[in-house]
Image (spheres, rainbow, N blue to C red):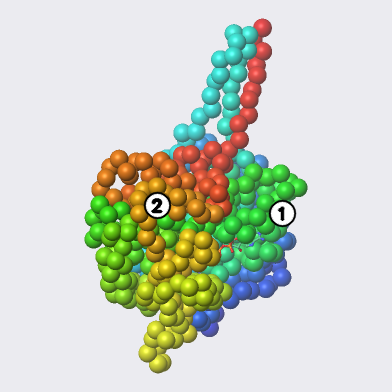
Amino acid sequence: MAHLYDEDRGIARFFNVIDGEKRSARTNDWLDSINPATARTWAVIPAAGASDIDEAVSAAYRAFRGPWRKMPAMQRAGLLRKIGDLIATHADELALIETQDNGKLLSETSAGDLPAVTQMFHYWAGAADKLHGETVDISPASLNYIRREPIGVVGIVIPWNSPLSIFTAKVGAALAAGNTVVVKPAETASCSVLAVAQLFAKAGFPPGVVNVVAGLGTTAGDALAGHPDVGKITLTGSTATARAITRRSADAIKPLSFELGGKSANIVFADADLDAAAIGTTTMAVFTGAAGQSCIAGSRILVQSSIYDEMVSRISTIAKSIRVGDPLDKATGMGPIALDRQFDKVRSYIELGRSEGGEVLFGGRSGASLFDDGSPFAKGYFVEPTLFAGLSNQARTSREEIFGPVACIMPFDDEDEALAIANDSPYGLACGLWTNNLKRAHRMAACVDVGAVWVNTYRRMHWALPFGGTKDSGYGRDSGLESLEGYMKGKAVWIDLT
Ligand code: NAD
């Protein structure tokens, strides 16, 4: 099977997909894509600007007014099922592209993300022909009904940690609701999304329905956010970017939805299964295959005082056994940080934690010190699992999103204190609860101010469940039928019967 990219002297070359065609940026500028495990350029992607975004939005607008709008819902559903199937036939290559691009373990991208991408498109195929309007009985003198219509062109901006999964959650729902899309992936991990974009034409989607344009956030992303013909912007990314997009789109008064960062509490009560909780607060939650670069990372571990020492010991044993290294190797437990800027940021937070008086219980090392001399990974962006004790919940290290394998552990005495600490955060994305007390689990689940709660498990996701946050973690929901509402608008119709 031919690759989903061109190759030029050992470097992969990916293209934008605009109006069903592979295109370079109009300026023919390119950005390097760095493999974070080796710090070497492995691919180049277009450095698109405002004129490329304008072409993509025009194509999406034409497709929306033309073939896509006119296509019966069942046929749209068929295309969504077909793209899911087609992605399955390219799953191995796409998983490898994503791992080389952002360092997430191949075991995670191939066994987790790619199968989920196919299933998500199938899920949205199932929804596409089941969208109904409503009639509303106001009076015998009129017939009133509500049409649920697509918005038009949806602008989708995504981050680098799980590009294909996040792309699919948003694109699947937007297309099922009848919109066309222009997607701007992260400049540091665009390759898997540029690769998959080529498959939509092969699946039979009309040109212009799905456009993917790679470039910097401050140029291509900014142009998309401000484009007058884009009917809605949805972002998964940082709170700072959400603020920039809000300002940029203010004149056009666009609907926005934001899935942003987190600083989630993972709370262990003394009555929990401590074996399960030790896994659930380490490899499941923050010292993961994505190296803690997960918006839902359980980076504040709260432990009831009576079991604090026991949990510290169990967590340390597990964390020290995690093998950090080559993301392509099945035996690896944690890969690199996805990009140099983020690598520097994570290391600066380790320094900050120390300067705030935190005690490093384990970890703290990064880069070449983790590898033998001459290792191909010595220049890679690796940080070992790191745990701070002795920091209050007011410390910056406990409050700000680090987005790496760095967590804080804090004791609490009772349920009220655990809840107060959990909710005392600028973020409100997720929370883990480890307890065998059913009543406590339900009480706490009701009172934590977040969008997702896990009881005796962590970091589980499913496309049928809505996902999103509160406070600085954003608003709006991805996934689940609830998210379709964000891609449609209601229209009230009056017919006089007198
Ligand atoms: P980021 O905000 O820096 O970038 C996200 C996207 O926004 C990129 O495509 C970027 O190019 C674009 N962008 C940047 N500036 C822009 C601007 N001014 N206008 C328009 N677009 C712009 O985020 P990141 O560093 O790529 O990703 C990490 C962040 O994403 C973390 O905060 C993480 O928690 C969050 N995240 C959230 C979820 C979730 O579902 N809640 C999932 C994954 C990641």
Relative to 3, residue 305 above or below: above
Quick one: SS at disc 1?
helix
**The CB of the residue at mark 2 lies under 8 Å from ligand 1:** no
Question: Image quadrant of residue 437?
Answer: top left
Labelled pair 2, 1 in contact (Cβ < 8 Å)? no
Q: Nearer the viewer, mark 2 or mark 1?
A: 2
Pick out the residue farthest to the bottom: 373
Question: Image quadrant of residue 311?
Answer: bottom left
Relative to 128, residue 269 above or below: below
Looking at the rendered structure, the kind of residue marked 1 is: Arg
* Residue at left offset 54%, top offset 54%: 426
**The CB of the residue at mark 1 lies under 8 Å from ligand 1:** yes
Q: Position of residue 181 (x, y in %)?
A: 59, 50
Q: Is residue 423 visible?
A: yes
Q: Position of residue 315 (x, y in %)?
A: 31, 67
* Residue at left offset 62%, top offset 55%: 242
Number of marks in picture: 2
Reading the image, the residue beneath label 1 is: 248
- Mark 2, residues whose alpha carbon is within 10 Å: few (<14), some, or many (≥20)? many
